[in-house]
Image: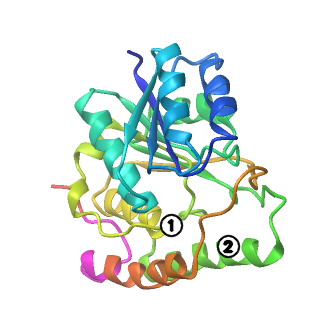
């Protein structure tokens, strides 16, 4: 078993998963992979089992239904903590997140509890997104900062590396968000408790295979979630003092 686990949630990712698995296993950094499949009707789960049978670094967690990105990651985090991994990643299966960046994340994680891959640190690095989607993402980041005070350029980003101690400090079953606001909530929970959070620059490329899971419900959930987080932090726009 390696120290680093890459959690890859899947739903109808049959075209992407074999290529992603091959890429992760060929990295110069040794990693294990956990595929969390939400009973994909295209057979992604069965394909994941076949890959796991060939490669001991690949593991599969089957869920009975499509129940949201947040719940998939919570299941993956709990599995990772039970297995005693030290560095635990969130990463998409569609190659919008470049696996070659993992080494940079791990360097930053040596001194931090959460490393966020930012599309906007030092400029915009987003490929093949329509302008409407780009504006939505940037405005979301500004909105989160205005309400919560979190000083991060990309709070909705889903390419992250957690240290084990950070995830252990979160009551995972109490996490409320399930869509993209899930990313905001986890970061806020750690930031407001004084954990060390940093961003590293990444280049984000829109998916080539499959379809985006973004929906109106996910956007609305994120809009209201930040106000709940502000209340959770006692209406403070800064971290709590550590005892």
The answer to whether residue 55 shows anywhere in this view is: no
Q: Which residue is mark 1?
A: 180
Q: Is residue 155 above or below residue 227?
A: above
Q: For numbered disc 2, what is the local secondary structure?
A: helix
Q: Residue furthest left?
A: 243
Q: CA distance from mark 1 to mark 2?
A: 14 Å
For the N terminus, which image quadrant? top left
Q: Residue at x 65, y 23 (%)?
A: 22
192 or 59: which is nearer to us?
59
Where in the figure is residue 133, as x and y percent of width and height?
73, 73
Q: Earlier in the sequence, mark 1 or mark 2?
A: 2
113 or 239: which is nearer to us?
113
Q: Is residue 223 above or below residue 198?
A: below
For the C terminus, which image quadrant? bottom left
Q: Count all numbered tags in the image, as a single digit.
A: 2
Q: Which residues are magenta?
A: 230-240
Q: Residues within 10 Å of mark 2 (few under 14, many from 20)?
A: some
Q: Main secondary structure of the magenta part?
A: loop
Q: Which residue is mark 2?
A: 138
Where in the figure is residue 208, as x and y percent of width and height?
79, 51
Disc nearest the viewer among 1 and 2: 1
Where in the figure is residue 50, as x and y percent of width and height?
52, 24
Left/right of residue 17 with respect to residue 179 in the rendered view: right
Where in the figure is residue 12, as x and y percent of width and height?
59, 50
Q: Residue at x 53, y 36 (%)?
A: 108
């Amino acid at each position: 078993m390696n120290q680093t686990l890459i959690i890859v949630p899947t739903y109808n990712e049959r075209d992407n998963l074999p290529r992603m698995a091959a890429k992760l296993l060929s990295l110069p950094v040794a990693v294990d992979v956990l595929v969390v499949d939400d009973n994909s009707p295209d057979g992604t789960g069965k394909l994941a089992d076949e890959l796991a049978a060939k490669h001991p670094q690949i593991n599969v967690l089957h869920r009975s239904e499509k129940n949201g990105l947040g719940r998939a990651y919570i299941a993956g985090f709990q599995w990772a903590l039970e297995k005693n991994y030290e560095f635990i990643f969130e990463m998409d299966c569609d190659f919008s997140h470049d696996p070659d960046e993992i080494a940079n994340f791990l360097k930053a994680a040596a001194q931090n509890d959460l490393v966020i891959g930012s599309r906007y640190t030092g400029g915009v690095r987003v490929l093949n997104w329509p302008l409407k989607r780009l504006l939505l993402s940037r405005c979301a980041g500004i909105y989160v900062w205005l309400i919560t005070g979190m000083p991060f350029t990309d709070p909705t980003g889903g390419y992250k590396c957690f240290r084990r101690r950070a995830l252990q400090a979160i009551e995972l079953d109490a996490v409320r968000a399930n869509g993209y606001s899930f990313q905001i909530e986890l970061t806020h929970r750690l930031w407001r408790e004084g954990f060390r959070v940093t961003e590293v620059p990444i280049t984000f490329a829109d998916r080539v295979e499959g379809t985006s899971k973004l929906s109106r419900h996910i956007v609305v959930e994120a809009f209201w979630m930040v106000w709940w987080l502000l209340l959770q932090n006692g209406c403070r726009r800064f971290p709590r003092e550590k005892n």
